[in-house]
Amino acid sequence: MAAFSFFLFIATVSTLFATSSSSTITVNRNLTDGQTIISDEETFRMGFFSPTNTSTNRYFGIWYNKISVTTVVWVANRETPLNDTSGVLFLSDNGTLTLLNRTKNVIWSSNSSETGNNPVAKLLDTGNLMIRNSGDTNPDSYIWQSFDYPGNTFLPSMKFGIDFVRGINKNLVAWKTETDPSAGEYTNGFDPEGYPQILLRAGSEVRFNSGPWNGLRFSGMPNLQQNDIYTFGFELNSRELYYKYELVNNFTISRMILNPSGAIQRLIWIERRQVWDLYLTAQMDNCDRYGLCGPYGVCNIRENQACGCMRGFVPRFPDEWQRADWSNGCVRKAELGCADGGDGFVKMTGVKLPDTRKTRYNVSMNLEECERICLRDCNCTAYSSIDVRTGSGCLIWFDKLMDIRVYGENGQDVFVRMAASELHRNAEAKRKVRIIVIPVLVGFAVILGFCLFVFYKRRQKKKGITNLVREINFAIDNEREDWELPVFGFNTIANATNNFSDECKLGEGGYGPVYKGTLEGIEIAVKRHSRKSKQGLDEFQNEVKCIAKLQHRNLVRLLGCCIEEDERMLIYEYMPNKSLNSFIFDERKRKTLDWSKRYTIITGIARGLLYLHQDSRLRIIHRDLKASNILLDKDMNPRISDFGLARSMEGSKTEANTRRVMGTYGYMAPEYTIDGIYSTKSDVFSFGVLVLEIINGKKNRGFRHANHDLNLLGHAWRLYKNGKQLELMDDTIKGSYVQTQVNRAIHIGLLCVQKYPEDRPDMPLVVVMLGSQIPLPEPKQPGFYTERRRPQEADCSSSNPEWSSSNHLSVTYLQPR
Ligand SMILES: *[C@@H]1O[C@H](CO)[C@@H](O)[C@H](O)[C@H]1NC(C)=O
Ligand SMILES: *[C@@H]1O[C@H](CO)[C@@H](O)[C@H](O)[C@H]1NC(C)=O
Ligand SMILES: *[C@@H]1O[C@H](CO)[C@@H](O)[C@H](O)[C@H]1NC(C)=O
Ligand SMILES: *[C@@H]1O[C@H](CO)[C@@H](O)[C@H](O)[C@H]1NC(C)=O
Ligand SMILES: *[C@@H]1O[C@H](CO)[C@@H](O)[C@H](O)[C@H]1NC(C)=O
Ligand SMILES: *[C@@H]1O[C@H](CO)[C@@H](O)[C@H](O)[C@H]1NC(C)=O
Ligand SMILES: *[C@@H]1O[C@H](CO)[C@@H](O)[C@H](O)[C@H]1NC(C)=O
Ligand SMILES: *[C@@H]1O[C@H](CO)[C@@H](O)[C@H](O)[C@H]1NC(C)=O
Ligand SMILES: *[C@@H]1O[C@H](CO)[C@@H](O)[C@H](O)[C@H]1NC(C)=O
């Protein structure tokens, strides 16, 4: 017994010694089962392990050190497990790592052709085990590294690809099962034939094709987009070919794996929940199954029947095709007539490029040279450019075209060879269409002209609002640049609002009163700008310019305007439920807004703002987003209103500066209030404030708490830091909420109000984050989270139901410079 404890003691000490001493194995040290080695920053650990606690198989491998769930990233003897704990790893003096079993047989060895001179094996913080000569600092002159022989895991900073100099193709090979590291059915790696692409194979059969690199991403992986989690890149030269990614933050933990059932997945470690979350999968849908539609077939996931034939092709076996067996693909309607020199090309747009194994390429050629070369070679079936950023490079195909699918926006162009007769047929078809279409268009134009004439005549007498609405829609649909807003006469509006009577008054904005009215049975709201205010005039013109061209279900719709002498009025759809602040800040009405309604409102505002920032042609920054500027339609859908302060950002400009800082305290971002810099990110800040207000039911400005001096942002931040964010929720909706949704909304709100604009997500990301389960980064401290209040300001938060901003809250001041 005593002897046994002594033995245990020795074992413990030697383990301690091994773990604490260093991250290296030297020639004189042996590593036995039970001992482990840790990288310098303690990110990774290596040693002997069993895949499950019931298995007696022992493997030598590398796993994450700081993660509670043991996650193995590399295994040495994956095909040859030890059946007991007698394994020994040692480094021989020629630089070979060898794993021996009890009978001193070699179970596994790092068979490098290079020999060393006083070598050391070191476990790096990237998870790479590297053998090199001690003292050698050239990063490329190693003897052997585990990153050259990846298992099922592709780690950050690993070069996934082919090392032409050493002659190594670094494939991923899936495990047989989750608990058996031996080689499974699936492999994933670059195929060096033709222009390189990554092929996923089951045995020798291709199952998924990444497509060739197009300068931005792999042609068949449109979801490989710029993101906040990792950066990625591709390299192809005479020495090496690889794809690589690096994490943006060193606190994020992410890896890519090929799982036993052949899915290529990116996983992210979620510390809070202690799980690996799926971030994305390379194969998205059925159209990603290689060869589903056969040669010259085109897959389109939006069609009922996924497969179709390219233009100029018909199904090879129509019967099979009818039965949804598309694998034999399509054949040409007309054979190529190369010898006659009559062939041409048909352009396919927005597609994933065909399998590039039977291709040749030249990265410095341009598209015209490419066409010439392809035309000259009778075996060439198609060509395209290589780099979508510059449109340069030449890729030509010499075989049947396989694995094409339609993406639309994220797709590329490919030019498919076609017999001259087919080309002519297409041209003829076009001409036919023209013969039919032109008279129809002319007829339509005549009718339209007549309508407009009648409409104009009617407008001389009495304004027809239903027609006007129709005209607005028409004009927007046609995206006419020179479109003008319908104009109403003063008397029409005066009649509609009962001569601007007080009963019709809905509220008072910073620029003047808002009235309710009825025009031809349609309820309208009329914003009457005060006569004298110069600012009112500017805002009026601005609003007309901005909103006249916008249309989105989450934006309020402008029906027309009235300009007569010094009268300036805007006519909107009437919103029966007034503004958001008449609900969330009202003791009684807030109860009617349960969690699901509030969540719908949050996502609606996010979509409206996304449209303004990105999807509208004008790229508009609202600059005065707040609860009183969110109107609610009869179904309680949010509509963003009041574009008096909005600014359009031309082209690629993303940030601007103003000397007149205008907006509303409590919603304005720090960089805007202090430096006058506004950008889409300052709207994101206001959006974040709104989200927290909608959840909490109190105004950010004017927020009071018994225990501290923080405003609502500070309060939310504090609760979040203490893991008590659910306490932020409005008491009146405690019965209706979905905990994960509330947590996520608060988290996103806090991300939006971060102090520095570059930390805040942009609206496309916010919309994605709201609508998915992607992991969220940790928020940093909000901007303006403390606020010294004067009592009279706090009173401003009293809520009178109003149609627009209350003037004492919107501010304007000149920035001292
Ligand atoms: C390490 O192991 C090898 C092979 O088992 C053995 O020859 C050598 O003596 C061992 N070295 C030490 C320092 O234990
Ligand atoms: C093996 O692990 C499972 C789950 O972690 C645990 O429930 C079980 O008790 C363990 N078995 C042994 C023999 O340790
Ligand atoms: C391991 O395998 C050897 C040879 O096959 C065998 O003699 C030994 O009993 C096995 N050990 C265990 C623990 O199964
Ligand atoms: C290195 O040494 C080991 C054992 O000492 C031997 O098996 C192996 O062949 C040697 N490798 C080279 C490249 O010389
Ligand atoms: C050691 O490995 C050799 C070769 O793989 C094998 O024949 C032998 O049975 C193994 N010994 C033990 C104890 O597992
Ligand atoms: C060792 O070398 C052989 C032959 O060159 C090769 O097939 C094998 O994959 C190599 N093993 C490792 C682990 O490098
Ligand atoms: C993470 O990065 C920061 C800043 O780049 C650095 O100060 C810190 O030491 C890094 N932490 C680790 C664990 O690498
Ligand atoms: C690639 O194209 C350029 C420009 O046409 C030409 O100068 C070069 O020789 C070509 N390279 C190869 C390998 O064909
Ligand atoms: C075209 O392909 C055929 C058969 O694959 C081959 O015999 C012929 O030489 C090729 N022609 C050219 C110009 O490469």
Image (cartoon, helix red, strand yellow):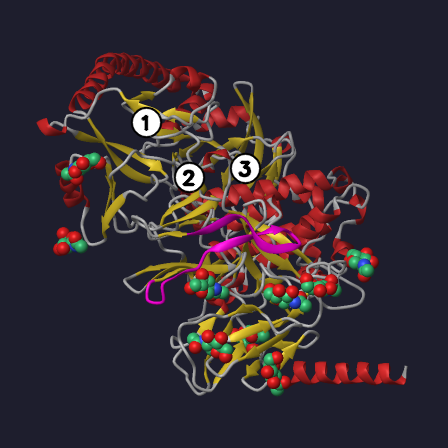
Q: Locate residue 344 relative to residue 317 in the image: left or right.
A: left
> Badge 2 local density, few (<14 within 10 Å), some, or many (20+)?
some
Q: Residue at x 66, y 82 (%)?
A: 18
- Residue 802 in percent (x, y) is at 63, 41
Residue at 76% x, 81% y is 12
Q: Secondary structure at mark 2?
A: helix
- Residue 503: where, in percent of width, then height? 64, 31
Numbered tag placed on residue 157 in the rendering = none
What kind of residue is marked 2?
Val
Does the magenta-highlighted stretch encompass residue 390?
Answer: no
Magenta: main secondary structure: strand
Residue 544: which numbered mark, if any?
Answer: 2
Q: Residue 554 — which label?
A: 3
Give the SS element for disc 1. loop
Identify residue for label 1.
310
From the viewer's perspective, is 259 left or right of 571?
Answer: right
Quadrant housing residue 440: top left
Foreground residue, 404 or 711?
A: 404
Label 3 – label 2 distance at C-alpha:
18 Å
Q: Tell me the crowding category of disc 1: few under 14, some 14 to 19, or many 20 or more residues within 10 angstroms, Cα based.
A: many
* Above or below, 528 relative to 163: above
Amino acid type assigned to the residue bearing label 1 in the image? Met
Estimate the x, y position of residue 350 in percent, counting from the top left.
35, 37
In magenta, the rendered stretch is 164-189
